Amino acid sequence: MFSVQSCPLPDNALLARYRRSGAFTDCYAVDMPGAVSLARYVAAFYTTPVFRLERLILQWVVSRPSTDAQAEQLAAGEIDTFAAWHVEARSPDQLLLADLRGPHGLSQGLLTGASVGSTVTPGCGGELIALGQGGDYRWSS
């Protein structure tokens, strides 16, 4: 069984700039055997049953439908808008997603490896969600 652990947000995380500006941040990680690319990790994350449900809710609530094929395109760097988010920043080992309402929108996320973190940005109630940890990606095969 895998265990999710709280961990410090890495200094090189794309979310770190929000932490430096005084925003609350958190980070959680899970170590799993095997290695996986960021693209495979992002695609797998957004096509899980839980996120399919979230995507269905977003389709109804904010009229932003999305498909598994679009999740694959996001993962491959072929599109910059997915469901209710747009790519705010991308690096070889991280993907920062922001709510379509703007850079300090309600929901933002960072995908990197096998951890998840978030931040609440001051003054606007925005939230960033981050997945990953730089370096090798861990995946259960």
Image: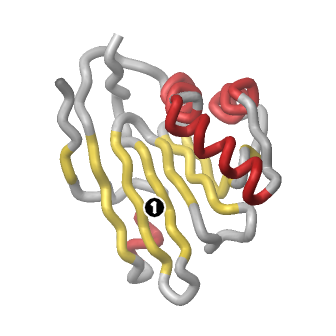
The residue at the point 35 percent across, 35 percent down is 114
Percent x, y of residue 55: 66, 43
In the image, 84: left or right of 110?
A: right
In the image, 76: left or right of 19?
A: right
Q: 119 above or below 64?
A: below
The residue at the point 49 percent across, 43 percent down is 111
Percent x, y of residue 73: 73, 29
**What scheme was used to colour the molecule?**
secondary structure
What is the number of callouts on the image? 1
Q: 83 above or below 35?
A: below
Label 1 packing within 10 angstroms: few (<14), some (14-19), many (20+) = many
Percent x, y of residue 93: 48, 38
Task: Residue under label 1, please give it.
Answer: 15
Residue projecting furthest to the top: 141
Residue projecting furthest to the bottom: 123
Along the line of sight, which residue is nearer the eye, 112 or 3? 3
